[in-house]
Image (tube, grey):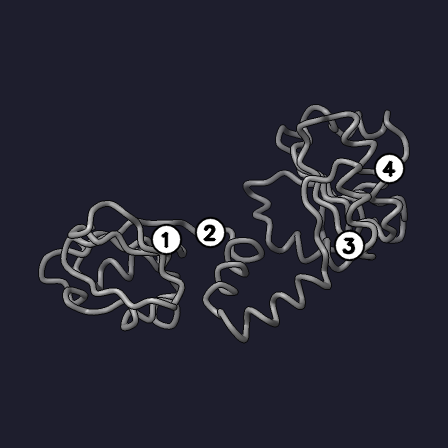
Amino acid sequence: MSQNLIAIFGFNRMTLELITQLNEKQNKLVILDADPVKIDLALQKNLPAQLMDYSQDDDLIALGIGSKVTTLFCFLEEDSENVFLTLSARALDKDLKIISVVNQPESAEKLLAAGATKIIDPFEICSNKAYQLLTKPSITWVLDEVVFGRADLHMAEIIIPDNSPLDQTYTSELHLNEKYNLFLIGVVDKELGDTLYFSLGEQDHKLDSGDILVVLGANRDIRKFKQEIGVIQ
C-alpha cells in the first residue's frame, strides 16, 4: 500500500457513511475488523478490507502505524475497544491523527486522555444538526458539503466585472445555493479595503463592480456562475 493511508477500524453503518464521503481516488484507505463476517460483507461491497486484530502492536506496525498511516478512525463497537486502540496507536505515533466515535458520553474524556485527536459523538451531532436546521440552514449546508459532503468542492474568488448584472444588487438576491448549488462564504468590498465580510445569511451587502465574491462549490457550478455574471474565462 502507498503512503498516506487512512485506516478505519470497525465495519458498520458509520464506516459506510465515511467511505461514501471520502474520495477513494485521492485517499488510500483500508477497513479492518476482527470479525470475519464483517470483512466478508465489506469485500462483497468491493471495499478495501482485511481481517485484523487491533490488540497486537506488531500487527499495527505492519499495517503502517508509525509510518504510512496518517489518519486512524476508531469505529469499533465498544468504547473500551476504541480506548485501547487509541492508546496503542498513540504510543506508536505521536503525530497520528486519531478520530474515534464515542458511544457513551462518559467515555469521551477517556478517549481524549488516551490520545484521540477528535471525538465523534453521534448523539451530539444529531441534536446539533436538528438545531441548525431550524436556526441556521446555511451553516448546516456548509457542514454537510464540506465535512460530510461532496469531495469535489473548491473555493473561488470571483471579481464582479464591469457591466455585470450583479452590479448594484444585494447578496440577498444571489440565491446561489438554489440557482447554482454554490455557497457564498463572503464578500470583499473594494471600497472598504481588502477585508473579507463573511456572509451566513444574516447580513445583506450591496454589491458593486470590482467587489470579490468568495464562493464554495464544484468547478462546473463555479464556471456556470461566472459565465452568467459576465466573467471572461
User: What residue is drawn where x is 75% and y is 51%?
Assistant: 101
Q: Residue under circle 2?
A: 152
How crowded pointer 1 is (Cα within 10 Å; few <14, some 14-19, many 20+) is rated as some
Query: In the structure shown, which secondary structural element does the residue marked by tag 4 occupy?
Result: loop
Label 2 near label 1: C-beta < 8 Å? Answer: yes
Q: Residue under circle 4?
A: 54
Q: Mark 4 or mark 3, which has the lower sequence index? A: 3
Give the quadrant of residue 168: bottom left
Q: Closer to us: mark 4 or mark 1?
A: 4
User: What residue is drawn where x is 75% and y is 60%?
Assistant: 13
User: What's the amino acid at mark 3?
Assistant: Gln
- Left or right of 5 in this view: 149: left
Q: Residue under circle 1?
A: 219
Q: Mark 3 or mark 1, which has the lower sequence index? A: 3
Counting every numbered tag in the picture gives 4
Separation (CA) of disc 1 from disc 2: 8 Å
Position of residue 7 relative to residue 79, above or below, is above
Separation (CA) of disc 2 from disc 4: 33 Å
Residue 198 is tagged as: none
Question: 64 and 36: which one is in front?
Answer: 64
Q: Closer to us: mark 4 or mark 3?
A: 4
Label 3 near label 4: C-beta < 8 Å? Answer: no
Question: 213 and 11: which one is in front?
Answer: 213
Position of residue 162 relative to residue 181, above or below, is above
User: What's the amino acid at mark 2?
Assistant: Asp
Q: Closer to us: mark 3 or mark 1?
A: 1
User: What's the amino acid at mark 1?
Assistant: Asn
Label 4 near label 2: C-beta < 8 Å? Answer: no
Q: Give the percent coordinates (x, y) of residue 207.
A: 20, 62
Separation (CA) of disc 4 from disc 1: 41 Å
Q: Residue under circle 3?
A: 44
User: What residue is drawn where x is 66% and y is 52%?
Assistant: 19
